[in-house]
Amino acid sequence: MGNRGMEELIPLVNKLQDAFSSIGQSCHLDLPQIAVVGGQSAGKSSVLENFVGRDFLPRGSGIVTRRPLILQLIFSKTEYAEFLHCKSKKFTDFDEVRQEIEAETDRVTGTNKGISPVPINLRVYSPHVLNLTLIDLPGITKVPVGDQPQDIEYQIRDMILQFISRESSLILAVTPANMDLANSDALKMAKEVDPQGLRTIGVITKLDLMDEGTDARDVLENKLLPLRRGYIGVVNRSQKDIDGKKDIRAALAAERKFFLSHPAYRHMADRMGTPHLQKVLNQQLTNHIRETLPSLRSKLQSQLLSLEKEVEEYKNFRPDDPTRKTKALLQMVQQFGVDFEKRIEGSGDQVDTLELSGGARINRIFHERFPFELVKMEFDEKDLRREISYAIKNIHGVRTGLFTPDLAFEAIVKKQVVKLKEPCLKCVDLVIQELINTVRQCTNKLGSYPRLREETERIVTTHIREREGKTKDQILLLIDIELSYINTNHEDFIGFANAQQRNTQTNKKRAIPNQGEILVIRRGWLTINNISIMKGGSKEYWFVLTAESLSWYKDEEEKEKKYMLPLDNLKIRDVEKGFMSNKHVFAIFNTEQRNVYKDLRQIELACDSQEDVDSWKASFLRAGVYPEKDQTENEDGAQENTFSMDPQLERQVETIRNLVDSYVGIINKSIRDLMPKTIMHLMINNTKDFIHSELLAYLYSSADQSSLMEESAEQAQRRDEMLRMYHALKEALSIIGDISTSTVTTPVPPPVDDTWLQPSGPHSPPPQRRAPSIILPPGRPPAVRGPTPGPPLIPIPAGGPSPFSAPPIPSRPGPQNVFAAAPDPFSAPPQIPSRPARVPPGIPPGVPRRPPAAPNRPTIIRPAEPSLLD
C-alpha cells in the first residue's frame, strides 16, 4: 500500500476526520462503504468479523442475516460497541453484541426466518479500526422457508441493490469455492450495478473444503472467469472452530499456513488470505482518499486565507495583557469617532441601501419635516381676521380711527412669531433622537466589550442631552430676538402702500423659489385609493411633482403619462386610514369645488408609512400646495367679517392681514435658515468634537481599564472558535500533505473479458420472467443445495464449440454428475440420473481444453449436489 503501512495511515485519516469535524460541514472526508454480498453459507460473516478482529455476528444454518447490518467502525482509544436503537448502553462483551443482534432481528422479523429491509445500526469503537462503514446484507436465497414471502428472492435482491448501487460503495462478492462460480448471484448482481468492474472484488471462501485433488488455482489467478480486480481466496473458521471459541488471530495463522503449504496456492500465498484482502481494501480506500485530496486542499486553502487577516490579531492573544487592553481601547474609541462622523457627514464605503440613516435623516428633518411643521401651525384665516379687528378696535378705544394703527400690526406679528417656538423645539427633539440612534448603531461594533459599549453610549448620550438644553435655549433666544424688534424696513417687506393695493383674494399660489422654472421637486410611487371601485378601488402609479403640476405615469420609465394635474387652487387634507387598510392616506382637492380628476372632487393618495406621507406633504409645500387649514372657509369668514365690520375697518383689517403675511413669511424664511445652522453648531459638531477629544478621558474616569476591556462571553467563544478552526485548517492541510507524500495510488486494472458474467441468468431470472416449475417424480424429495447436476456449468450450443476458451470450475460432487449438452432451461425439465457418479480429477467430458497458454494441470472443483430449481 505504498511506502506507508495501513497501521500508520489509520491515525492520519482519523486525525483528518477529527480536523474536519472541527471545521464544520463545509469539508468532510467521505469514505466509501463496503457492502458484503453473497449467498447463504458463503462465509460473509467471517469476512466481516475479520475487519473488527472480534467474533460478534450470529451463526447458524439457513438464512441467518435477515436484516441489513450497517456496521460503523470508529477509531477510539477504548473498545466497545453501541446500537442506534439502544444508544445509552455500551457493550464491552461482544457475545452480548451477538445476542442483541439476534434479539433485535427477531423483534422486527419474528422468530420464523422472516426478513425486513429495516437496517440494524451498530457502531464499534476500537483502536484497531479505520473510520469506515461495512454493510452485512442478507444471503441470497431462492426457496422461501418459515414466514418468508414467496418472492423472497426478489425482495432480497432489491434490498441488496439498494446498497450496492451507490457509486461510493465497494462490493465484496463472496462465493464459496465448492459452488458453481459462473452462476454466482453475488457476481451477477455486482455486474448489474458495476458493469466496468471498478468497484467489485471477488472473494473465494471455503478453499479448504474442496475435495481432494481439486483446487481453484485458475480462478484465483484470474485466468478462468476473470474479474477486473480479480479474486482473493480466504479460509475462514469452521463451525467446529467457532463452537470451540477459536481465536481470530489463531485462525489467521492457520489460514496463512494453509496457503503456504498447499501446492496449488503456495506460489501466490502473499496474494491470498484475509490480511491481503484487508490490504487490497485499504488500498482502494487510499485511492479514494487521494482522489478527493486536491479538491479538499483547494477548499481548505481558500478558507484559511479568508481567516488569516482576522486571526492575525488573535495569534499572540493574551486576555490579561494591559498593553493589549490599552491599545484595543484606543482603537475602539478612535473607530467609534470615525464611524459616527461618517454616518453624519456621509461616506462612500459601507453605504446603507435599504433605508436612510444618520446625516441623511437629519437632512430630511431640516428641509422637509421642519418646513412642514411650520406650515401646520400657520394661522387660521377667520381667527386671524377676527383678532386683527379686535386689535384695531381696542387700540382706537372710544375713538373712531381714521388710519390703520401700527400697534395692531406689531401685536398680531408677535403673537404669530411666538407660535414658532413649538415646531422649532420639536425639530430639536427629532434631531436628538436621530443622533442617539446613530450613537447606538456605532456602538454595535463595541459589542465585544459590553462594559465599554455601555459606558460609551451612556457618556455620549448624556453629552447630547446636555447640549439639548443649550440648543433649545439658543433657539428660543433667536425667537426672542425676532420679537424684540419688528423691522418694517426689511427689503422683502411689502410696506403699507403695497399692502393697501393688494387684491383681497389670497387664494392664489404663493411665490416659491425658482417659480419661473419647471423644477422637478419629487418622484416616487403612490397609490390612488379612490380611482375606481369597479377596477379594484386602488392602483399604484409613478408620480412626478414639479413646481407647476402633478403628473402620474404607468411606471418609472415615464413614457406612458396617465394624467397631468395643474397645482392651481389645490390644497391638501388628511384622510382617515381605512379599517382593513395598512396604508396612510392624504387627499388633494380644489378649493373652487371643481373636480380634480375625471368625476372625482378629490384624489386620495396612499403611502406605506406616515413618514412617507409627511415627506410628500413637505414636497407639496415646496410646490406651493398647502394644507387645508391654510385658508379654510375663507369665503365664509369674509362674509362673517363683512357682516360685522364697516367698509373702513374691513380695509384696515385687509391691510394689516397682508402686512402680517409678508412679515411672517420673512421670519419663517429666517428661522428655516438659522435652525439647521444652530443645531449643527451647538449639537452635532459639538458632539463630534466631544467624541474625538474628550470621550477617552470620560471613559478612564468612569471605570478602570480592566473592567472596560473585559470581553463578553460571546466574543471569547468567537475568538476561541476562530482560532480552533484556523489551527484545524492548518492541521488538515498538513495531514493532507503527509498523506499525499506517504501514499501512492495504484492504477486501475485493465479491462478483462467478463462476458461470461451476465447480469441475469437461469439461476437469477428477472421478475418478469421465471423458469417453469419442475415436476418431480413421486417419492423423491427435492434437493435444495447446489446447481443442477445434469448440464455442464457453461452451456455448449449444439453443433458448435464452447463460447469460452477456458472450462468452468465444476461444482461439488453430489449424487449425480453427468456432463452432457445443456438443454434449453425453458423447455423440458432435465432428466434426473439414477445414481451419483464420482468424477476423478480431470477434464470433464464435453468441456474443451484450455488454450496452450494456460497451465496443463486441470483445475476442477467437485460438483455440488443437484438443485432441481435450475
Image (spheres, grey):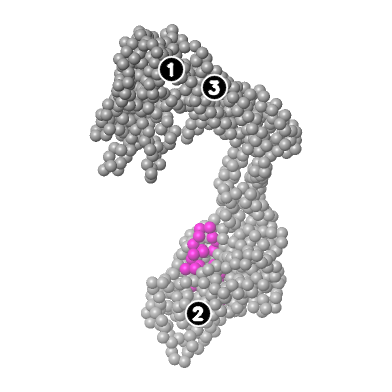
Q: CA distance from mark 1 to mark 2?
A: 108 Å
- Residue drawn at the location 48% of the way across and 85% of the way down: 782
As drawn, 815 above or below 205: below
As for residue 181 lying within the magenta part, the answer is yes
User: Is residue 308 among what the camera can see?
Assistant: no
Residue placed at 70% from the left, 35% from the top? 708
Residue 402 within the segment the image draws in magenta:
no
Q: CA distance from mark 3 to mark 1?
A: 28 Å
Q: Hey, which residue is sitting farthest front in the picture?
A: 398
State the mark number for residue 147.
2
What number is the disc on residue 679?
3
User: Taking the image as drawn, is residue 112 in sight?
Assistant: yes
Give the residue drawn at x 29%, y 37%: 531
Do labels 2 and 3 touch, CB within 8 Å? no
- Residue 171 lies, in percent from the top left, at 54, 63
Above or below, comparing residue 502 to residue 559 in the picture: above
Question: Tag 1, which secondary structure?
Answer: helix
Per the image, the residue denoted by label 1 is 412
How many residues crowd mark 3 within 10 Å: few (<14), some (14–19), many (20+)?
many
**Residue range (magenta):** 158-184
